[in-house]
Image: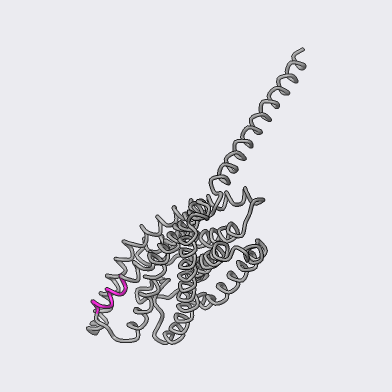
């Protein structure tokens, strides 16, 4: 049976992009899975073990680590999917959850970073307001608000289900059909302005104010405060420039091009750029532990507390074992006599 020329061309384009995805995604998602799980898992362990010392910043980092770990847990499913050339074995529900987890992680990360930057700005630029605005209770309220807002506004992505291809292969994470483009464009621009442009503008203003304050009072500010602020500015800026900005720019261009008929070469180029920017966006969960290590404050002290607790527990277990052996030895002597 002969296929029309444009259909044969589309099949060739799809085969080529599937090959590119199967080469890039398994490697990048495997790296992100390992680094993200180890890094965020370690941060979470330290925060839980030292929970009695929690501050507003630690509460934001705790929620950021949870958002990262939830996303990382879905990545092995994606690795298997792309290793098998885009064949989904895990059912419709897990396909929806895997798509949903990506967007929840992305926008929770952006908003948690924005909240941390805003309150760090208050602490440095307006120290008189510090006690009133920066508290654990307010941090908890902000985090609950972010979780509620993001999970609710990204819920339409739960509707993205599995599709059956012309080769009877179950597909997931596929581009939307043409009839859904209008709704997708609306969701895109809402998430672009509320989830990226507004937070990025807020962070830029906050960092400009922080740097201005630090430069004016460089002699009066504590070295630890200056160092934490500079590291935070550096890491968050890198995450936005490397992970978030390329993804949102490319997604905007790609959605507009999808509305028009394009050549196979242009379509292939755009699909490859999707793979690259999507991978970069997923890498944000590997940068977040660095934010806590370099700018979280008291991390090394918390880590030493964590290690002392582990050593103390090991010493306690060893002492208990020796005591148990001694008791057993005495009991054995009585039985022998």
Q: Quadrant of the C terminus?
A: top right
Q: Position of residue 315 (x, y in %)?
A: 63, 32
Q: In the drawing, does residue 78 fall left or right of residue 118?
A: left
Nearer to the camera, 198 or 271: 198
**Quick check: 73 above or below 322?**
below
The residue that appears at 27% across and 70% down in the rendered structure is 16
Q: Quadrant of the N terminus?
A: bottom left
**Quick check: 178 above or below 326?**
below
Examine the structure image and report whether residue 80 is included in the region drawn in magenta. no
The residue that appears at 45% across and 70% down in the rendered structure is 204
Nearer to the camera, 322 or 331: 322
Q: Position of residue 106 (x, y in %)?
A: 48, 68
The residue that appears at 68% across and 24% down in the rendered structure is 325
Q: Determine the main secondary structure of the stretch shown in magenta.
A: helix
Q: Residue 94: in sight, yes or no?
A: no
- Find the magenta span and give its range: 264-272
> Which quadrant holds residue 308?
top right
Q: In the drawing, does residue 304 fall left or right of residue 170?
A: right
Q: In the drawing, does residue 321 fall left or right of residue 114?
A: right
Q: Position of residue 24 (x, y in %)?
A: 33, 62
**Quick check: 273 above or below 255?**
above
Examine the structure image and report whether residue 265 is included in the region drawn in magenta. yes
Q: Position of residue 128 (x, y in %)?
A: 62, 64
């Amino acid at each position: 049976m002969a296929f029309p020329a444009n259909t044969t061309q589309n099949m060739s384009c799809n085969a080529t992009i599937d090959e590119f995805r199967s080469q890039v995604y398994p490697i990048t998602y495997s790296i992100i899975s390992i680094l993200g799980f180890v890094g965020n898992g370690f941060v979470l362990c330290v925060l839980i073990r030292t929970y009695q010392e929690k501050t507003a910043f630690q509460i934001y980092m705790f929620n950021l680590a949870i958002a990262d770990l939830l996303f990382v847990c879905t990545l092995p499913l994606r690795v298997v999917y792309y290793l098998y050339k885009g064949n989904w074995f895990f059912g419709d529900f897990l396909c929806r959850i895997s798509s949903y987890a990506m967007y929840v992680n992305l926008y929770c990360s952006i908003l948690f970073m924005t909240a941390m930057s805003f309150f760090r700005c208050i602490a440095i630029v307006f120290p008189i307001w510090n006690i009133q605005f920066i508290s654990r209770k307010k941090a908890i309220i902000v985090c609950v608000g972010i979780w509620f807002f993001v999970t609710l506004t990204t819920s339409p992505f739960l509707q993205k289900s599995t599709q059956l291809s012309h080769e009877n292969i179950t597909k997931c994470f596929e581009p939307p059909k043409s009839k859904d483009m209008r709704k997708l464009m609306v969701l895109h621009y809402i998430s672009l302005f509320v989830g990226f442009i507004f937070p990025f503008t807020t962070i830029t203003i906050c960092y400009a104010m922080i740097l201005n304050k630090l430069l004016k009072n460089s002699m009066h500010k504590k070295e630890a405060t200056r160092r934490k602020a500079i590291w935070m500015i550096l890491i968050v800026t890198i995450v936005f420039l490397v992970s978030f900005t390329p993804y949102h720019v490319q997604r905007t261009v790609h959605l507009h091009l999808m509305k028009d008929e394009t050549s196979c070469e242009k379509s292939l180029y755009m699909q490859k750029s999707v793979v690259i920017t999507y991978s970069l966006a997923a890498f944000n969960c590997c940068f977040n532990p660095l934010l806590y290590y370099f700018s979280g404050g008291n991390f090394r002290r918390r880590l030493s507390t964590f290690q002392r607790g582990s050593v103390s527990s090991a010493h306690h277990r060893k002492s208990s074992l020796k005591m148990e052996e001694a008791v057993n030895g005495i009991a054995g002597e009585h039985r022998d006599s």
